Amino acid sequence: MGIFSMPSLGADMEDGTLVEWMIKPGDTVKRGDVAAVVETQKGAIEIEVFEEGTVHQLTAELGQKLPVGAPLALILGQGEAAPDTPPAPPEPVPAPPSAPSSPAPTVEPTVAEAPPRPAAAPTPVARPPQDVAASPAARRRAAELGVDLATVAGTGLGGAIQLADVEGAVGAAPAKTGTAAVPAHEAVKPSPMAEMRKAIAAAMSRSKREIPHFYVSQTIDLTPAAQWLEAANADRRPSERLLMGALFVRASALAAARIKAVNGHYTNDAHVSSDTVHAGVAVALRGGGLVAPPVFDAQDKTVDETMAAMRDLVTRARAGRLRGSELTMGTITISALGDTGAEAMSGVIFPPQVALVGIGAPQKRPWVTGDRVVPRKTVTVTLSVDHRVCDGRQAARFLAAFDDLMQSPEAL
């Protein structure tokens, strides 16, 4: 018998809200199947089961805010009988105490003070259905209620539509005009982006507080990679073209496979090196915020496979459709500034990882080639490293390997 519990989807996650079941009693499940959708500070996340068997009972209710580790469902293995006493339903996370319900004292406005005006409600912007970013729970509920998602204003990360947005669109009443102020005791719900900033702040504060960072940088010649990309993309359609970022991820994965000290997790006061490279790709979300889901087994993928995986991750991250394992299983992270921006970046390590590759914007500068000084396209790569598991020599070897790989892009 297995208990499917609320997983930890990050080092600083404490709870999540169950918004959709993808399984029901009697279903047969296997490792990796998506069982539910949970709303967290990082958006709507699809969580997977890690056992095989038959779903016997769902022990949590939709809409419950549950702590990490709370039981969600009971899964019976092959040949197992149902228990005589079912597990107790999980206790929801208590809501913060509300302010007193007594009316706030009124204050006569002076000449310099005008009564507060109510905030205008956001006007939904019509979008083509294929461009609408919405969580799975929101899409299903919209279909049940006959709501056109293109008319719903999303409040999720990057404007993604959440379950509450759909239900609010159905039950919303026309706004009343007037000058009445919002009661002083009425609670204001934090925006999803504010919640994400809190999650990022907690994770990065923990990282800088607990991880002894050091940084090693190297400027490399990017011209061979740029020339190879131009030739490789010459006969491709725009949707199939390779980006420089795919070469960066591929070179980082191969270098990390060689220098194992930078690849893995630091847990329980020990470095757990990984034989596979799950290369986290930092994705900037529309409206702000950052996530770093990984390209799994990046050391074994071709450049084209890496590019396809990156496109998929970016699309799903901005639509709020990442899976739980994609927030916890990265072994090293690559963060690139793109074609414009600062020429160097020293990043903060995502715990429990032990290294982060920061890649600045490419710059054109004089470069010594043989006995000549010629203009070349260059980029500065900075490796942020956990000094508990790695030293400067190993970090320098990683950058040297990265440089060698980028000089022979056809071998990537």
Image (tube, grey):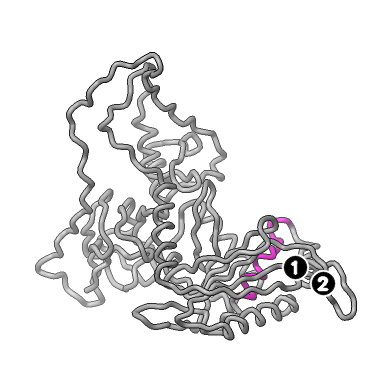
> In the displayed structure, does residue 104 sit left or right of residue 52?
left
Question: Visible in this render: residue 258?
Answer: no
The part of the image, by quadrant, that contains residue 325 is bottom left
Q: Kindly identify which residue carries mark 2.
A: 367
The part of the image, by quadrant, that contains residue 49 is bottom left
Between 75 and 383, the one nearer to me in the picture: 383
On screen, 297 above or below 226?
below
Between 301 and 99, the one nearer to me in the picture: 99
Q: Position of residue 30 (x, y in %)?
A: 35, 71
**What's the amino acid at mark 2?**
Trp
| Residue 108 among magenta residues | no
> In the displayed structure, does residue 130 sit left or right of residue 15?
right
Q: Position of residue 172 (x, y in %)?
A: 36, 29
| Residue 243 among magenta residues | yes
> How would you classify the magenta stretch by its main secondary structure?
helix
Asked if the residue under mark 2 is in contact with the one under mark 1, i.e. CB atoms within 8 Å, the reply is yes
1 vs 2, front mark: 2
Q: At 79% from the left edge and 63% from the top edge, which residue is drawn?
A: 364
User: Which residue is the extreme one toward the left?
Assistant: 84
Q: Kindly identify which residue carries mark 1.
A: 378
Magenta segment = 238-252
Q: At 23% from the left edge and 62% from the top edge, which residue is drawn?
A: 70
